[in-house]
C-alpha cells in the first residue's frame, strides 16, 4: 500500500491534528503547517492558502501564533 493509497486515513489524520493543534509543540505545528501549504500549493489550489490556513487555525486555536 502506498502512503496515500487508502485515502480514508487522510481526513481522519487531518481532523486529529486539528483537534490537538493547540497542544502540539510549536516546531511540530510549524512543520505540519508548512507540509500542508506545500501539499496544497502542489495541487494547484488556492493561491492564498497560507493565509487561509493560518486564519482557520487561529479561529480554532486562538493561542497559536
Image: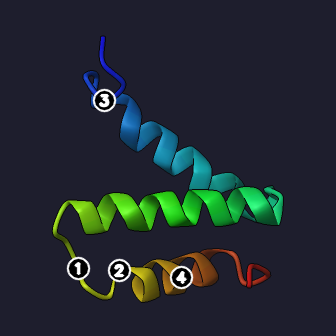
Assess whether mark 1 and mark 2 are in contact (beta carbons under 8 angstroms).
Answer: yes
Instruction: Write down the residue under mark 1.
Output: 46
Q: Residues within 10 Å of mark 1 (few under 14, many from 20)?
A: few
Q: CA distance from mark 2 to mark 1?
A: 5 Å
Q: Position of residue 42 (x, y in %)?
A: 25, 61
Residue 60 lies, with reference to residue 2, above or below; the image says below
Residue 28 lies, with reference to residue 47, above or below; the image says above
- In the image, 63 versus 4, the foreground residue is 4
Q: Which mark is residue 4?
A: 3
Mark 3 or 4, nearer chain start: 3
Q: Residue at x 36, y 25 (%)?
A: 3
Q: Position of residue 62 (x, y in %)?
A: 72, 84
Assess whether mark 4 and mark 1 are in contact (beta carbons under 8 angstroms).
Answer: no
Q: CA distance from mark 1 to mark 4?
A: 13 Å
Q: Residue at x 52, y 87 (%)?
A: 55
Q: Which mark is residue 54?
A: 4
Instruction: Write down the residue under mark 2.
Output: 49
**Relative side of 6 to 50, left or right:** left
Q: Residues within 10 Å of mark 3 (few under 14, many from 20)?
A: few
Q: Residues within 10 Å of mark 4 (few under 14, many from 20)?
A: some
Q: CA distance from mark 3 to mark 4?
A: 24 Å
Mark 1 or 3, nearer chain start: 3
Q: Residue at x 62, y 83 (%)?
A: 58
Q: Residue at x 41, y 68 (%)?
A: 37
Q: Quadrant of residue 5?
A: top left
Q: CA distance from mark 2 to mark 4?
A: 8 Å
Residue 21 lies, with reference to residue 8, above or below; the image says below
Q: Position of residue 12 (x, y in %)?
A: 45, 38
Q: Quadrant of residue 45?
A: bottom left
Amino acid at each position: 500500500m502506498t502512503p496515500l493509497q487508502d485515502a480514508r486515513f487522510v481526513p481522519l489524520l487531518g481532523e486529529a491534528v486539528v483537534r490537538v493543534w493547540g497542544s502540539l509543540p510549536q516546531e511540530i505545528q510549524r512543520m505540519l503547517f508548512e507540509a500542508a501549504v506545500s501539499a496544497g500549493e502542489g495541487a494547484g489550489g488556492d493561491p492564498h492558502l497560507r493565509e487561509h490556513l493560518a486564519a482557520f487555525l487561529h479561529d480554532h486555536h486562538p493561542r497559536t501564533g
